[in-house]
Every structure is written in C-alpha cells, then in structure tokens.
Amino acid sequence: MIRPRRTATAAALVLGAALVGVFGVALPASAHVSVNPKEATQGGYGRVAFRVPNESDTASTTKVEVNLPENAPVASVSTIAVPGWTVALEKRKVDPPLEVHGSQITEAVSKITWTASAGGEVKPEQFQEFGVSLGPLPEVDQLVFKVLQTYSDGNISRWIDEPVAAGAEEPEHPAPVLKLAKAAAPAAGGASPSVAAVSQADDDDDDEDSSAGVGLGIAGLVAGLAGLVLGGLAFARTRRPATPSDA
C-alpha cells in the first residue's frame, strides 16, 4: 500500500479543523478515484469520467482497472481515447440477454483496463480522467464500480469498498458510485415534456391574441358611443331656435 504522507496529512487536518471552526466545512482526509458526474438517469445513455488522482510521492500510476457491476449489466460501453494510454475491454455472458432496440444482447462489458505507455503515466501530484459512454443504464438505484489502481513501484490501491448508509463514516477505500434517478414521467396525453411546453406556449399565445382582440373590440365600441354622443349634441345645437344673443 502507499505510505501515508504524514506531513501533508497533518497539514490537511489542521486546515480542515480551521475550516470547520470558521465555516463549518469538513474536508475529506484523502483523494480517491471518483466518477463524474455522480448522477444519471435510468434507461438513458450517460457519459462519465473516472477521475484518478496519484497519491504516491515517488511512484506513478501505470494501470487503471474499472470493474462494472455484475448485478446490473450495461449493453453498450465505449471509451474515449486518452493520449499515452491503451485500453482493453473484457466481456462476459449475460443471462437472461439484454434487450436493446429490439435486439438481444448476450454479452456485456465486465471490465475496462487502461495501461500507460512510456511517458503517459500519472505522476505524483497529478490526476487523469478516463471517459466512458454507457447505456442504456439499468433500472437500479446505483452502479458501483470497483477500481484497481496500479503504481510503478508495484503497489496497488484497491478502491473496492461498498457504499455505506447516509451518515455513516466513509470507508477507507470507497468504490466510485454512479447514482441513477428514475426517468421523468411523460406529460399528460402522452406528449413529451418539450411538446407539452410548446403546446402550452401556443395556448398562451392564443390567449394573448384573444385578450387583445377583446380589448380592441371594447375600445372600438367606446369610441363609437362617444361619436354618437358628440354627434347628438351637435345636432341638438343646430336645431335650437335662434335667440337675440345668437344674432
């Protein structure tokens, strides 16, 4: 295992205590492999990145192995090219098969392994992100990815500890976790939210047009009545008998 950095850890604890005292904020004791973003939607496709920090003062990270959960297979998995690294995908049989767009998928990716070429290693005080696209995401609450991080000196950090309940102390080597939220329910009438929004916008425009038409009609009626009144007054004046004062 990687030897703890006593000086850095002590400094982090002092800084953490100061922040807790002033701002009420606690800092994590050490960095670990994580997945970003941390949330996605069930049934959809997601693009995530596994962020791998180097925690050794003297050795570089030369290999990263990400194991996909066996209890929630994903039909489609692809990776993004990372300069200085090669990637290999391992597959396994799935039973029952996964059905995607009417097709039966009998194999799913079980592990992704990135290996550094000469000069591509993650050196001390650096980190590297490894991008993955995967889906359709299964209808489960979360995906737990167990990760092995190999160093140039032969040490291996095993980020494989299962997540704990809310409020419990975080394990020493937590596995990256991708939370999966349920897909939003379709709008009333089966229309998608975007269609419903457009329809609502059209209805609002129609209401505005109707209101404007009514307003113009009322204004026209008022103007017409005013004209009749003025015309009647003028007519009455012309019909009034002449008086000496009018002469």
Image (cartoon, rainbow, N blue to C red):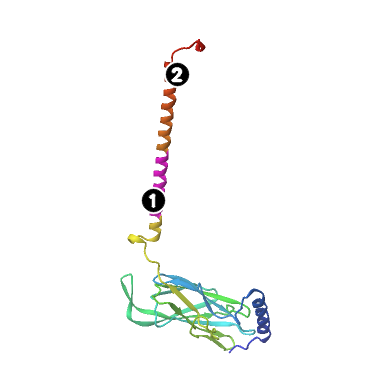
Name the residue at 44% across, 77% down: 142
Which quadrant of the structure image shows residue 18? bottom right
**Residue 213 location in percent, x, y?**
40, 40
**In the picture provided, is 177 more to the left or to the right than 138?**
right
Near-viewer residue (52 or 41)? 41
In this orientation, does residue 101 appear?
yes
Q: Mark 2 points at which residue?
A: 237
**Residue 118 location in percent, x, y?**
57, 80
In this orientation, does residue 131 appear?
no
Q: Does the magenta stretch include residue 192?
A: no
| Separation of marks 1 and 2 at Cα, in angstroms | 51 Å
Name the residue at 58% across, 77% down: 127
Q: Earlier in the sequence, mark 1 or mark 2?
A: 1
Q: How crowded is mark 2: few (under 14 residues within 10 Å), some or many (20 or more)?
A: few
Q: Residues within 10 Å of mark 1 (few under 14, many from 20)?
A: few
* Residue 23 disc label: none
Near-viewer residue (143 or 59)? 143
Element type at marker 1? helix
The amino acid beneath tag 1 is Asp
Look at the magenta stretch and give its main secondary structure: helix
Q: Mark 1 points at which residue?
A: 203
Near-viewer residue (215 or 166)? 215
Q: Up-down: is 37 above or below 5? A: above
The residues colored magenta run 198-215
Near-viewer residue (234 or 154)? 234
